[in-house]
Image (spheres, rainbow, N blue to C red):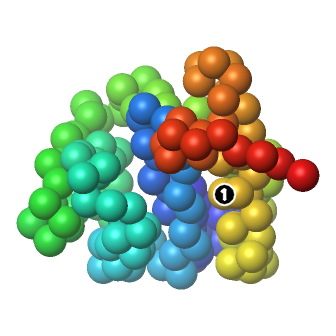
């Protein structure tokens, strides 16, 4: 997700089964920064849970073959101009826009703001998950919120 100035962006990774969402603020929209962000995000997940990545056709994803080899994941490419083929990610980006509206400068947000958004999304019950949270589905644990 690109901010107003186009400098900092939000890199989002969404698990298709559980809808668990990982978000990272990346200072520049280039393939080197994106790859570094993906390694950081996906490195936090046990390898047996990460099977594939389906990016859009942005130039920032040109060198995903490095990530594919490094993490042992398959990269699937959606057709150009076909966001419907990545529906879960597009829907999640819409939810993220509740916290970071369009035309806002991502540079003005802190890492804590990004972490807060991620936590809120992962603790939000979803109809598609039978009103469980992404956290509960991904970790197969009930979430006890106080």
* Residue at the image point whose x is 35% and y is 78% from the top: 36
Based on the displayed image, in which of its 4 quarters is residue 126 positioned? top right
Q: Characterize the local packing of mark 1: few (<14), some (14-19) or many (20 or more) Cα atoms within 10 angstroms.
A: some
- Which residue occupies the foreground of this view, 133 or 32? 133
On screen, residue 25 versus residue 71, left or right, reads right
Residue 103 in sight in this render? no
* Residue at the image point whose x is 14% and y is 71% from the top: 70
Residue 79 in sight in this render? yes
Indicate whether 55 appears above or below 72: above
Residue 124 lies, in percent from the top left, at: 74, 39
Indicate whether 53 appears above or below 115: above
* Residue at the image point whose x is 52% and y is 75% from the top: 26
On screen, residue 138 versus residue 2, left or right, reads left
Indicate whether 37 appears above or below 19: below
- Which residue occupies the foreground of this view, 118 or 35? 118
Residue 68 lies, in percent from the top left, at: 15, 61
Based on the displayed image, in which of its 4 quarters is residue 5 positioned? bottom right
Based on the displayed image, in which of its 4 quarters is residue 103 positioned? bottom right
- Name the residue beneath numbered marker 1: 118
Element assignment for label 1? helix
> Residue farthest to the right?
146
> The N terminus lies in which quarter of the figure?
bottom right
- Which residue occupies the foreground of this view, 13 or 93? 13
Residue 30 lies, in percent from the top left, at: 37, 74
* Residue at the image point whose x is 83% and y is 48% from the top: 145
């Amino acid at each position: 997700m690109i901010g107003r100035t186009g400098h900092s962006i939000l890199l989002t990774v969404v698990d298709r089964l559980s809808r668990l969402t990982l978000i990272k603020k990346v200072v520049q929209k280039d393939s080197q920064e994106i790859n570094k962000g993906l390694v950081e995000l996906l490195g936090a997940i046990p390898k047996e849970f990460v099977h594939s990545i389906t990016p859009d056709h942005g130039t920032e994803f040109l060198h995903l073959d490095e990530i594919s080899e490094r993490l042992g994941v398959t990269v699937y490419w959606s057709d150009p101009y076909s966001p419907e083929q990545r529906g879960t990610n597009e829907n999640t980006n819409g939810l993220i826009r509740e916290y970071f509206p369009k035309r806002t400068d991502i540079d003005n947000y802190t890492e804590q703001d990004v972490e807060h958004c991620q936590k809120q999304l992962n603790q939000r019950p979803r109809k598609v998950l039978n009103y469980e949270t992404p956290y509960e589905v991904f970790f197969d644990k009930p979430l006890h919120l106080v």
